[in-house]
Amino acid sequence: MAGAKKTHPLDKVNDRIVACRKCPRLVEHREHIGRVKRRAYRDHDYWARAIPGFGDPHARLLIVGLAPAAHGANRTGRIFTGDRSGDWLYRALHRAGFANQEESVSRDDGLRLNGAYITAAARCAPPGNKPTREELALCRPYLLDEMIIFREQAARAARPLVLLALGQIGYAACLESLQAVGVEIPRPRPKFGHCAVHEIERGITVVCSYHPSQQNTQTGRLTRVMFQSVFTKAKKLL
């Protein structure tokens, strides 16, 4: 039809993510949190569904986190939005030139990403921030679909693709998804470490970072300078 809006392949992936109810434990938890709420957000309408990816659909930087926060993305409906981890992430993205603003509080706050896209190993807020192996496996096809899309886009444009893995689970999800799309992972398997850079194949590089969780940021394991250095490395690779 003339004038019809063109859709990007990521739109279909995100539609399937939002409708997902594969994991009964996670569905029950996210919806329970949405009903009970936190006192500070008692007047908010919680999203309480699986969280789609967010950002530039033609990105060259693909950021892979762990899972939505119960009162962060599970409340706002946008990944890394409305929690302390997101405060760190979007500030770093803004300073590196990937975001038009450094604060993210809601889905309609005007935030835009340029050249970066954010996704996660798990799409529902898990109890204790710990999805099970089975839940991660059930969620993996979504990351796999995203990986195929971004890898094919990068190949067509003859440009590099950089994956930024936040935490060891995000790193494992990156390598498993790359392997599933036919990328041969080097042996011995590259080790995770903050600011470690691993070229997996020509044109595809994984950069590792500690996750900007409060457990890491409040203890000093991850500092602002350390976190910003990861984005500096990623930008140079691009």
Image: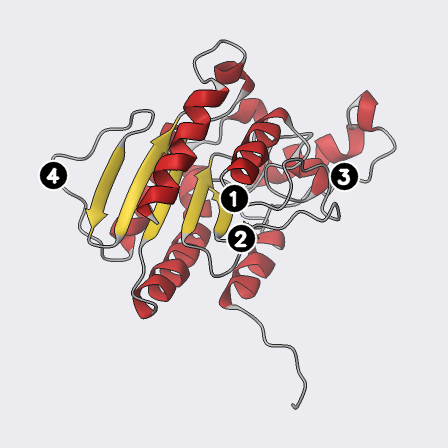
Distance of label 2 from label 3 (alpha carbons): 27 Å
- Give me the residue at 45% from left, 31% from top: 132
Name the residue beneath numbered marker 4: 187
Q: Please state which amino acid type lies under the numbered disc 1.
A: Gly
- Residue 158 against residue 106 in the figure, above or below: below
- Give me the residue at 85% from left, 28% from top: 42
Residue 114 tag number? 2
Mark 4 or mark 2: whose residue is earlier in sequence: 2
Distance of label 4 from label 3 (alpha carbons): 44 Å
- Give me the residue at 33% from left, 70% from top: 156
Distance of label 4 from label 2 (alpha carbons): 34 Å
Q: Please state which amino acid type lies under the numbered disc 3.
A: Tyr
| Location of residue 216 in the rendering, given as x and y in whole percent from the top left corner | 48, 16
Viewer-nearest of discs 1 and 3: 1
**Residue 205 sits in quarter:** top left
Mark 2 or mark 1: whose residue is earlier in sequence: 1
**Between 27 and 222, which is closer to the camera in this rendering?**
222
**Between 162 and 146, which is closer to the camera in this rendering?**
162
